[in-house]
Image (cartoon, rainbow, N blue to C red):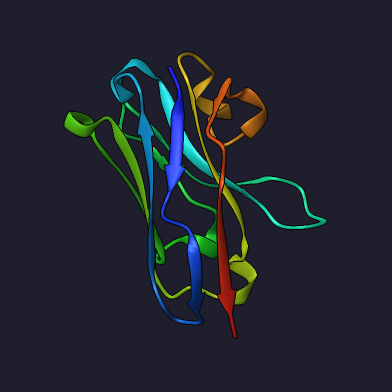
Amino acid sequence: VQLQASGGGLVHTGESLRLSCAASGSVLDFYAIGWFRQAPGKERGAVSCITNSEGTTYYPDSMKGRFTISTDNAKSTLYLQMNSLKPEDTAVYYCAADKSLLTSLYSDGAQYDLWGQGTQVTVSS
C-alpha cells in the first residue's frame, strides 16, 4: 500500500487549501491515519489524526476550528481542509497511516509505519 499526498500550494494569509492523500489500498485497512507537518528547522508534528474504528479525531489547539480531517472510504482518500491559513502553517505536509498502534499514541508520528511523500504548503503574509 502506498500513500500519495497532493493539494499543496502557495496561498495568502486567510485563504484555504484542501490536501488529499490517496491510498492505493483501502483506508479502512488502517487503524489510524493522519496528517503531520514539518517546517524548516522544526520537528515534525501532528496536524490532525483520526482512528477509523472509533472515529476519534485529534487536533492541536492551534488548529482546532481551522483544520478538518475527513475520509472518503469509497475513494480511499484522506482529506485535510485547512481554512484561515497563517504564515506559521507553512510546512511540508505528510499523510501517514498505521494498521495498529496504541490509541493513546495516535497523534505521535513515530508510531506510524506508512508515509506519503509530502506536499508543500506555503502561506504568504
Q: Position of residue 8 (x, y in %)?
A: 47, 58
Q: Quick check: 17 left or right of 121? A: left
Q: Position of residue 75 (x, y in %)?
A: 21, 33
Q: Report the number of discs.
A: 0
Residue displayed at 56% across by 74% down: 123
Residue 24 to residue 41: above or below = above
Residue 15 to residue 44: above or below = below
User: Looking at the figure, which quarter contains the C terminus?
Assistant: bottom right
Q: Position of residue 61 (x, y in %)?
A: 54, 60
Q: Quick check: 117 left or right of 53? A: right
Q: Does residue 64 show up?
A: yes
User: Looking at the figure, which quarter contains the N terminus?
Assistant: top left
Residue displayed at 77% across by 57% down: 40
Residue displayed at 78% across by 54% down: 42
Residue 49 to residue 121: above or below = above
Q: Determine the residue located farthest toward the bottom in the rendered image.
A: 125
Q: Quick check: 88 left or right of 77? A: right
